[in-house]
Amino acid sequence: MFQTLAKTFATLALAAAAITAQASVLQPVKVADNIYALVGPLGQRDAANAGDNATFGAIVTPDGVILIDSGAGNAGAQLIAKALHTVTDKPVRWVINTGSQDHRWLGNAWFAAQGAKIIALATTVDVEQANAEKEMQSLKMQFGVNAEDFKPLTSPDPLPGNEAKLTLGGVSLELRHFGTGHFPGDAVVWMPSQRIAFSGDLVFVDRMLGVLDNGSRVDQWAQTFKTFASTLKPEIIVPGHGKPCSLAKAQAETGDYLDWLVREVKPAAESMDDLEKTVNRVAAATPEAFLKLNNAEGINKKNINRTYLEFQMQ
């Protein structure tokens, strides 16, 4: 088993190394037979990536493609379709939304118009609908996209509860909600037979995660990551951002960073220490392993600041 895993990760590493040499926005990386990650840029969103600076997933079945997340509106959906056409001629038959950030679901309508069925847990759909106008306005401000381009919004008929078992194109999947992640309502697509998890934005690797003012809290996200890791123990993770990875890498670059933020910032916030001094002190003490992540220079202080404010508002 360990030899097989070693070969798998060696193959993933070789495939991922080719990403920087290719020009397309989303680069397909083979995870296993008929299973792909569509890896987007690690930097911030811009017009070239249409908000798809993220990683998506695709499972090719005899009956068509199961797509994990649909991109940031029509332009993002079409970038995904373009990347998919390099690995299969089969149509997208199903789209599963793992979250409510724009690139997880605002491309639903485009794929639905091509005949795809949209699937998500009720908790994900609730947050999608609550955040829809804010997400569309954000894209409009960044790229000049008309919010009308996303209407009618296509949310799925919600699946009740925190877990759903699905069989799509002969493939058995589980859709699981373990708690608040990057956004409230974040979910994971789990392939139990292959022990592959499409984590959505619960996991960031290769780049520093972002703490946002969106109803999610760092301590909740940290606990959700622990529950996800201990419950599933995945062998391969297709993250929400970055290349396919092991659980150990996800722990080092997401779980450990979240735990560090909580450990370093919570006591200062509870003691009402000066915000600016706290941000500067904690930033100066950031472990080198985190500072090596893409975007760390521009985002680490913002994460510390936002974490402090979260604990102040409890």
Image (cartoon, helix red, strand yellow):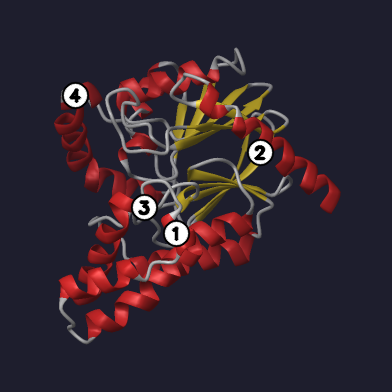
Q: Quickly name the residue at label 3.
A: 296
Whole-number angstrom distance, CA of label 2 to CA of label 4: 36 Å
Q: Residue type at mark 4?
A: Val
Query: First in sequence: mark 2 or mark 4?
Result: 2
Query: First in sequence: mark 4 or mark 3?
Result: 4
Residue furthest out toward the top: 89
Kindly identify which numbered label has been placed on residue 240: none
Q: Quickly name the residue at label 4.
A: 145
Between residue 52 and residue 101, name the one nearer to us. Answer: 52
Q: Are marks 3 and 2 in contact (CB under 8 Å)?
A: no
Residue furthest out toward the bottom: 271
Kindly identify which numbered label has been placed on residue 290: 1
**Label 1: how many residues lie within 10 Å, few (<14), some (14-19) or many (20+)?**
many
Q: Is residue 313 visible?
A: no
- Residue at figure coordinates x 19%, y 24% from the top left: 145
Helix, strand or loop under label 3: helix
Q: Are marks 1 and 4 in contact (CB under 8 Å)?
A: no
Query: First in sequence: mark 1 or mark 4?
Result: 4
**Label 3: how many residues lie within 10 Å, few (<14), some (14-19) or many (20+)?**
some
**Label 4: how many residues lie within 10 Å, few (<14), some (14-19) or many (20+)?**
some
Q: Residue type at mark 1?
A: Phe
Of circles 4 and 3, the one toward us is: 3
Q: Quickly name the residue at label 2.
A: 13
Q: Are marks 3 and 1 in contact (CB under 8 Å)?
A: yes
Q: Quadrant of the C terminus?
A: bottom left
